Amino acid sequence: MTEPLIDTFGRVHNNLRISVTDRCNLRCTYCMPEEVVFLDRSQLLTFEEIARFVAVAAPLGIDKVRLTGGEPLLRRDLPRLVRMLCAIPGIRDVGLTTNGILLADQAATLHDAGLRRLNVSLDALDPQRFRQLTRRDGLERVVAGILAAKRAGFEPVKVNAVSIRGVTEHEVVPLALFARQHGLEMRFIEYMPIGADQWERDKVFLAHAILEMLEREVAPLVPVDNYDPRAPAMEFRYTDGGGKVGIIASVSRPFCLRCNRVRLTAEGKLRNCLFALDEVDVKPLLRGGAATEEIAAVIRKNVMAKWEGHEINTARFIKPLRTMHAIGG
């Protein structure tokens, strides 16, 4: 039970991303279709089932958990789940990724429950472009949520922006300046083939172009001293002391050979990769009272079966049938 989760490529897995709902109050074009049928709530894992799964995974080496969606803040009484996860021996880090629409009202309660890591998705500061991407209004609410998170004590607050050539490339500098002004850590993410729309590779605003734009129009950057090679983001700091920037280059610089993540969907499917074509249903085990050893064996088998990488840049790549909102961001 105490041996680490290692796959056939020697990668050690300690990071678990848990989707708590597939529902969302936005309809981001790169994430989900505008018209969608959500899961019935009875199909979702309960908080107790999620906590049981984490309690089994923790002795296997899982020590970091991130709650996602859909939009996780739509899940009622989420701080209760945060408290449950923080109390599990071996779990040292519980984080959350949100679109920020509901964050202003929940930031303080989530922080009080023990949540410490927070990422807020914000792709544009221009209201029209925000609506073009999300197919909803709400920019002001997202900004209010970010500022409320700062007041609640989250440090740092990370802001995630998907960079799409011809759509959001002109948002890079305004977002970077906004982050510097408010003491946020900005993260730019290359546009990936995981949404409902047809993916066009020439729309990927590549990492090197983002960095060049930031250095040219904001301030010089250098790699951070304490960079974690297992982290998905390449991290840089401004030489003038203006904070940090992360670049997640899933397309141009895949980090598959350093990946340490597994994923649990809202209805209990275990996935060893965001782009996985296969998944394992653990809900029957959790609802059927399966022994700890049986659940642990399923987790180990799923990790052991992990492929070398997603192969986005090859003709062998197959786009998953699930879109991002159904997998977990």
Image: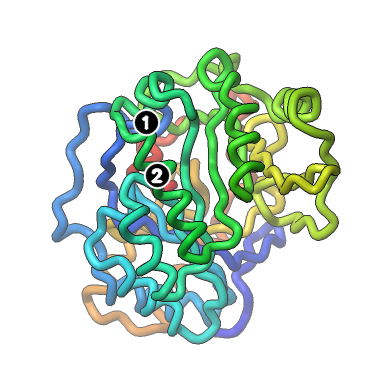
Name the residue nearer the viewer: 46 or 160. Answer: 160
Q: Where 53 falls versus 30 (above or below)? A: below
Q: Position of residue 34 (x, y in %)?
A: 26, 27
State the separation of the CA atoms marked 1 and 2. Answer: 10 Å
- Can residue 300 be seen by looking at this rendering? no
Q: Position of residue 173 (x, y in %)?
A: 64, 27
Going by the numbered disc 1, the residue's amino acid type is Cys
Residue at 83% x, 46% y is 223
Residue at 37% x, 31% y is 28
Q: Are marks 1 and 2 in contact (CB under 8 Å)?
A: yes
The 10 Å Cα crowd at callout 2, few under 14, some 14 to 19, many 20 or more, is many
Residue at 59% x, 75% y is 61
Residue at 25% x, 67% y is 77
Q: Nearer the viewer, mark 1 or mark 2?
A: 2
Q: Where 97 falls versus 194 (above or below)? A: below
Q: Where 117 falls versus 328 (above or below)? A: below
**Which numbered disc flags the more N-terminal residue, 1 or 2?**
1
Direction from residue 211 to residue 14 in the image, left or right: left
Q: Which residue is mark 1?
A: 28
Q: Position of residue 80 (x, y in %)?
A: 30, 74
Q: Which residue is mark 2?
A: 99
Direction from residue 257 to residue 169 in the image, left or right: left
The 10 Å Cα crowd at callout 1, few under 14, some 14 to 19, many 20 or more, is many
Name the residue nearer the viewer: 316 or 174. Answer: 174
Going by the numbered disc 2, the residue's amino acid type is Asn
Direction from residue 22 to residue 154 in the image, left or right: right
**Residue 275 shows which numbered tag?**
none
Q: Position of residue 56 (x, y in %)?
A: 44, 79
Q: Secondary structure at mark 1?
A: loop
Q: Secondary structure at mark 2?
A: loop
